[in-house]
Image (tube, helix red, strand yellow):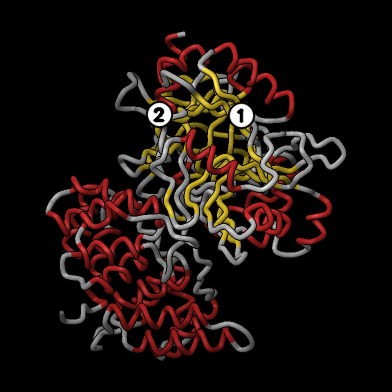
Amino acid sequence: MARTPFAALAETFAKLEATSSSLKMIDILAGFFTRLSPEEARMAAYLLRGRVAPEFLPVELGIADKLVIRALTQSTGVPIAKIKQSFRKTGDLGDAAALAGNDRKRGPSLAEVFRQLEEIARVSGSGAQEAKVRLLVGLLHKCSRREAKYVVRIVLGRLRLGVAEMTFLSGLSKALTGSREHKSTLEYAYNVLSDLGEVAELAVRKGVAALQTVQPELGKPVRMMLAQRIRDVAAVPKQIPGLVHVEYKYDGERAQAHVWKRGGVVLFSRRLENITHQFPDVVAAIRSALHGKAAIVEGEVVAVDPQTGRLLDFQTLMRRRRKHEVEEYVRKIPVRYFLFDLLYLKGKSFLKKPLHERKKSLAGAVARSGQDAEARDPVVLAKYAQTQDPEEIESFFAEAVAWGAEGVVIKDAQSIYEAGTRGRHWIKYKKEYQEGLADTFDGVVIGGLYGKGARAGTYGSLLVAAFDPEANRYASFTKVGSGFTQEQLKQLPKKLRSYERPERHPLVITGMHADIWFDPALVMEVTGAQLTISPVHAVAKDKVKKGGLALRFPRFLRWRPDKAPEQATTVAEIYDLYRMVKRH
């Protein structure tokens, strides 16, 4: 197969950038992927995400604005002052690169651009920045205006085309089968491997059907199964007839541990981030607990009071999220790793085995595996009960809350592990439901309104959205101005600066005004008094008369750095909750 020019991918970028329609994006992607070799499909999949590796690998291009400006000057001969002027005018160094460039060039292949970007990402150590600039100059020398525009955006981490994973997989399905109907097979493979590039390469090389048998692999995080919410325990038997496992819902950081037979351990967060360095104590403990067994296990890392063993809150645990002084904070904030699931053991996948069997095998695999929330062992099995009785669920819930848990997770004892899904087989029931609050919600920050008076110089409130995975949209849900400490308010401009944009993001739906808009990236947890109908908000606007659903009297609770924007509360969840509340 002939080499695919990078110009073809740059043209695809331009088409994707020009539309906010998921259906059009799917058609654009389908048209492009039909022409690619398996290796090119892998490269293109990464580049469409603005990366050169899967998101669970900490591979960053690491070039700052000022270095890119220098590279543009060296590659085009345009003076720095003129490039800076273009940058100030457009607000986009990619556009500035296009203005400075020319189209009298051969143009590199897709593979050439990818490999040069990979080399830029690999450079480290003394003199790394200068080496990165030299490599970027060499690449830009070969690029046309449009190609340079997107190369610059990629190296700066600002491609942001708005192509969600499911949109990508639909496009790939249509390219390879002529239909979007096979997306579920690709989605299964992606949920198991968490690597769009590998999924794309395997699908092009072997066909979509071959991905039905994909198995978990050590070192590649399995996308985590999520729980739905419920407001009335009495409804559990209707949703899950038969035996359920009722577990403590811990207020910590969910972590998936990959353990090699010879003792290697990697911890992944819900966002697929490698968080191993943050928890050396957990790494040592899980290595000891699994003593020579190759496994993928899942649980929650929770801060604990060293004197009483009681569970502490998420915000306390987040003080462990640091690059420096890690050992000091291991001593300051001890943690315990509560294991609740087994995904892989000794070369065999456990994803399709029922929960009760996974629990039994997990208990057998873990040394000192007593189920005891008060145990001092750093690794223990999460506390749970087996029952079919709603009254027993309520009793266990009360015990969990008294010990410091958020509530309980109720799981179908027969359920398989549905990677990456929020299935009906897991239900969460939290203490907020008993306190008369509407609920807690994980919302994505999409805009801000400038503060006045005591809040001058920061934001008076932030516009927050829910995620609609079907439409690949962020629908505004509420405007949050209360609950922040003075220090949090002071830090907002700095925290949000890198996500600022001059206009509303094309994937955001709202009737609200904002003084400044943001890329949907940061997730915050909020609570409020009740759900109501608003003429300016957009959640479930197609299902609710006279407007969309909104949260009244919202209050900021905490930032959720462990969640990606696609893991925010969904539009469907909020609508289901609204219907439940109306029925009551």
Q: Give, as a three-letter code, the residue at label 1.
A: Tyr
- The part of the image, by quadrant, that contains residue 280 is bottom right
At x 53%, y 55%, the residue is 295
Between 479 and 456, the one nearer to me in the picture: 479
Where residue 401 sits in the image (x, y, percent)? Answer: 69, 24
Is tag 2's residue or tag 1's residue first in the polypeptide sequence? 1
Q: With respect to residue 225, does 177 lie above or below?
A: below
- The part of the image, by quadrant, that contains residue 153 is bottom left
Between 400 and 415, the one nearer to me in the picture: 415
Quick check: 572 left or right of 479?
A: left
At x 73%, y 47%, the residue is 378
The answer to whether residue 474 of the structure is visible from this angle is no
Where residue 174 sits in the image (x, y, percent)? Answer: 17, 54
Q: Are marks 2 and 1 in contact (CB under 8 Å)?
A: no
Q: Quadrant of the N terminus?
A: bottom left
Name the element at disc 2: strand
Between 505 and 468, the one nearer to me in the picture: 468
Residue placed furthest toward the top: 584
Determine which residue is flagged by label 2: 424
Where residue 97 sits in the image (x, y, percent)? Answer: 38, 77
Residue 299: numbered disc: none
Mark 2 Cα within 10 Å, few/some/many (few <14, many 20+)? some
Q: With respect to residue 195, does 436 lie above or below?
A: above
Name the element at disc 1: strand
Determine which residue is flagged by label 1: 384
Q: Give, as a three-letter code, the residue at label 2.
A: Arg
At x 26%, y 49%, the residue is 185
Q: With respect to residue 113, does 511 lie above or below?
A: above
The answer to whether residue 260 of the structure is visible from this angle is yes
Disc 2 to disc 1, C-alpha distance: 19 Å
Residue placed furthest toward the front: 364
